[in-house]
Amino acid sequence: MAIESDRVTADVIEANEFPELSAAYAVSGVPKIVVNDRVELLGSQPESRFLAAILQAVKPKDESPGDEESR
């Protein structure tokens, strides 16, 4: 996604080389994906789950999960 859009950035962190950062994000396995500090995924995920997590992370915080059905 980061390759396709200037609005998306991605960082890869080696958990063993940055123990403080690993502790801050409670890394207990890899890969650990954190999107906008709002949604976290642990382990390999299917593309559909990854996309759902991204969409959830970019929703306004006051929008509840069922709000999109009423639009």
Image (cartoon, rainbow, N blue to C red):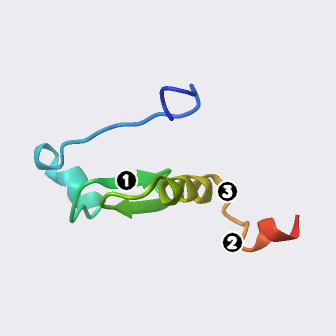
- Return the x and y of residue 7 as percentages of the image width and height: 59, 31
The quarter holding residue 62 reads bottom right
Residue extending furthest toward the left: 16
Q: Secondary structure at mark 3?
A: loop
Q: Which residue is mark 3?
A: 59
Q: Position of residue 63 (x, y in %)?
A: 73, 66
**Which residue in the structure is indicated by mark 2?**
65
> Residue lying farthest right?
71
Task: Check the image and report above or below for 1 versus 26.
Answer: above
For the residue marked with disc 3, what is the amino acid? Lys
Q: Residue at 21%, 65% (x, y): give it.
A: 28
Q: Give percent across and percent down for residue 30.
A: 23, 56
Q: Which residue is mark 1?
A: 33
**What whole-number distance in Å separates the C-alpha atoms at marks 3 and 1?**
17 Å
Quarter-of-image position of residue 68: bottom right
Q: Residue at x 18, y 43 (%)?
A: 14
Dots 3, 1 in contact, CB < 8 A: no
The residue lying at 21 percent from left, 62 percent from top is 29
For the residues bearing labels 2 and 1, Cβ distance under 8 angstroms: no
**Cα gap from disc 2 to disc 3, whole angstroms:** 9 Å
- Mark 1, secondary structure of its residue: strand
User: Which SS class for mark 2?
Assistant: loop
Horizontal arrangement in the rendering, residue 9 relative to residue 44 (left or right): right
Give the number of the disc on residue 49. none
Q: Determine crowd level at label 3: few under 14, some 14-19, many 20+ residues with C-alpha closer than 10 A.
A: few
For marks 3 and 1, the one nearer the N-term is 1
Which corner quadrant of the image does residue 40 belong to?
A: bottom left
